[in-house]
Image: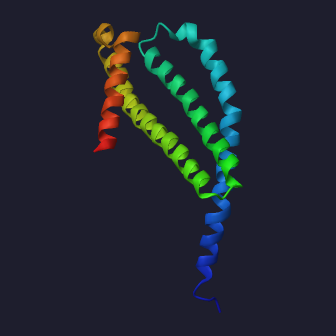
């Protein structure tokens, strides 16, 4: 006969072991894939500069580099503080992870918004070729769009 608590053992094993294995596997895959992505991006950079979507693609590349730095900092912070159980160090760990987690959340929101704008831009460029001169953003225009996107993200997070 199966006891009534048989699921609690499965849940406790899942909570303790599985996330660590999954995170370790994901970090490993991320670290293996990124050099290839960076190489291909830099290889095609000169050809892509003439595209209407280059500024957005370039922003995504810079965001991905910053996200990797955040993930590495979070991982290193966790490894450094995991063996220490003093309350001040655990609080420092939580603060560092919270800061980087908030930053990463903002980046993801802005990237989703930019992907939506990119989809609209590509739709208009494909079906209405005459919009090319209006939708081809230069660095200055893209900087304005990014400032608005980050401002909207920060305001929505604050509310």
In the image, residue 64 above or below residue 53: below
The foreground one among 92 and 41 is 92
Question: Which residue is depicted at the point 34% across and 13% down?
Answer: 141
Colouring mode (rainbow / by chain / secondary structure / one colour): rainbow
Residue 105 appears in which quarter of the rendering?
Answer: top left
Q: Position of residue 56 (x, y in %)?
A: 44, 20
In the image, residue 4 above or below residue 45: below
Q: Which residue is the extreme one toward the bottom?
A: 1
91 on left or right of 135: right
Q: Quadrant of the C terminus?
A: top left
157 on left or right of 101: left
Residue 14 appears in which quarter of the rendering?
Answer: bottom right
Numbered marks: total: 0
Question: Which residue is depicted at the point 68% across and 25% down?
Answer: 36
Q: Position of residue 82 (x, y in %)?
A: 68, 53
Question: Which residue is depicted at the point 65% across and 92% down?
Answer: 1
Q: Position of residue 46 (x, y in %)?
A: 56, 7
Question: Which residue is depicted at the point 49% across and 46% down?
Answer: 98
Residue 124 appears in which quarter of the rendering?
Answer: top left
In the image, residue 125 above or below residue 154: above
Q: Where is residue 138 in the image (x, y as percent from the top left)?
A: 38, 9
The foreground one among 38 and 70 is 70
The foreground one among 39 and 63 is 63
């Amino acid at each position: 006969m199966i006891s009534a608590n048989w699921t609690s053992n499965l849940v406790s094993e899942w909570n303790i072991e599985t996330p660590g294995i999954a995170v370790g596997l994901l970090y490993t895959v991320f670290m293996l894939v990124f050099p290839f992505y960076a190489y291909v991006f830099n290889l095609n950079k000169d050809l892509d500069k003439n595209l209407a979507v280059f500024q957005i693609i370039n922003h995504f590349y810079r965001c991905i580099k910053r996200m990797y730095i955040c993930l590495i900092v979070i991982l290193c912070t966790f490894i450094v503080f995991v063996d220490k159980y003093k309350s001040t160090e655990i609080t420092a760990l939580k603060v560092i992870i919270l800061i980087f987690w908030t930053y990463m959340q903002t980046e993801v929101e802005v990237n989703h918004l930019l992907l939506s704008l990119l989809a609209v831009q590509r739709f208009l460029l494909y079906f209405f070729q005459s919009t090319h001169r209006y939708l081809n953003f230069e660095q200055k225009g893209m900087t304005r769009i990014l400032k608005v996107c980050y401002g909207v993200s920060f305001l929505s997070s604050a509310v």
